[in-house]
Image: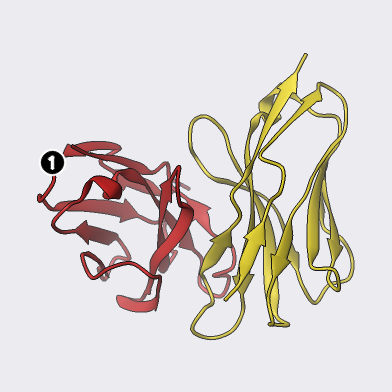
Chain colours: A yellow, B red
Amino acid sequence: AQTVTQSQPEMSVQEAETVTLSCTYDTSENNYYLFWYKQPPSRQMILVIRQEAYKQQNATENRFSVNFQKAAKSFSLKISDSQLGDTAMYFCAFMSLNTGTASKLTFGTGTRLQVTL
Amino acid sequence: KAGVTQTPRYLIKTRGQQVTLSCSPISGHRSVSWYQQTPGQGLQFLFEYFSETQRNKGNFPGRFSGRQFSNSRSEMNVSTLELGDSALYLCASSPRGAEDTQYFGPGTRLTVL
């Protein structure tokens, strides 16, 4: 079974600054995806960024980028130029590509990010 | 294109009752997954349906069941409600061939009294 660990329950960052959220995972599989989801106070879960495990290049989406270290099973999210609208709960998630477990997201416990003025 | 819709958005039930939640996926999406979110257990996978067939199931008791219709709309049912079933129930849909990309609905907040 896979596990996803987010060791930072809460973080705070000032507007326009950069913040990094940590995530580690444990799996014996080789083919999988990793995701960061954002859940603002509205509770709507929004996909921020995804990473295919077979790709060495780190994924980037505008101000969001990841540092994927496959051997260390680490998947951190960097938010640059933080904005007030980035205030939300951030979840790291894992999805296996193996038949029978595909489409199942395993989530971490989340990191609550507060962006301040 | 309209997003994933879930009805109702809020629901209050009492212990022992049963409840049915509905999820309409994004048009053209055939895979629907359900998740339970609670403060204590976090986000947990319930089950996934594709083309009216349950393809994957999480570790929940048999009181939790679901189904999918030919138009890809899905329902989940919880029988004999317990206080611990109070949660936000999230539904997500995925396009065919890209089941790794899940688009979530706004959720149904279920309170069991």
Q: Is residue A62 visible?
A: no
Question: What residue do we see at 20% from left, 50% from top?
Answer: B82
Question: What residue do we see at 71% from left, 48% from top?
Answer: A7
Q: Is residue B77 above or below residue B98?
A: above
Crowd around label 1: few <14 · some 14–19 · many ≥20 (10 Å): some
Question: What residue do we see at 28% from left, 50% from top?
Answer: B85
Going by the image, does B53 lie left or right of A104?
left
Q: Is residue B28 above or below residue A44?
A: below
> Quarter of the image containing the C terminus of chain A?
top right
Q: Amino acid at mark 1?
A: Thr
Q: Quadrant of residue A82?
A: top right
Residue designated by label 1: B14
Q: Is residue B96 above or below residue B81?
A: below
* Location of residue B72 in the rendering, given as x and y in whole percent from the top left corner: 33, 65
Q: Is residue A63 above or below residue A76?
A: above
Of residues A28 and B19, the one nearer the viewer is A28
Residue sitting at the far top:
A117
Helix, strand, or loop for circle 1? loop
Q: Quadrant of residue A57?
A: bottom right
Going by the image, does A104 lie left or right of B19?
right
Going by the image, does B65 lie left or right of B30?
left
* Location of residue A93 in the rendering, given as x and y in whole percent from the top left corner: 63, 59
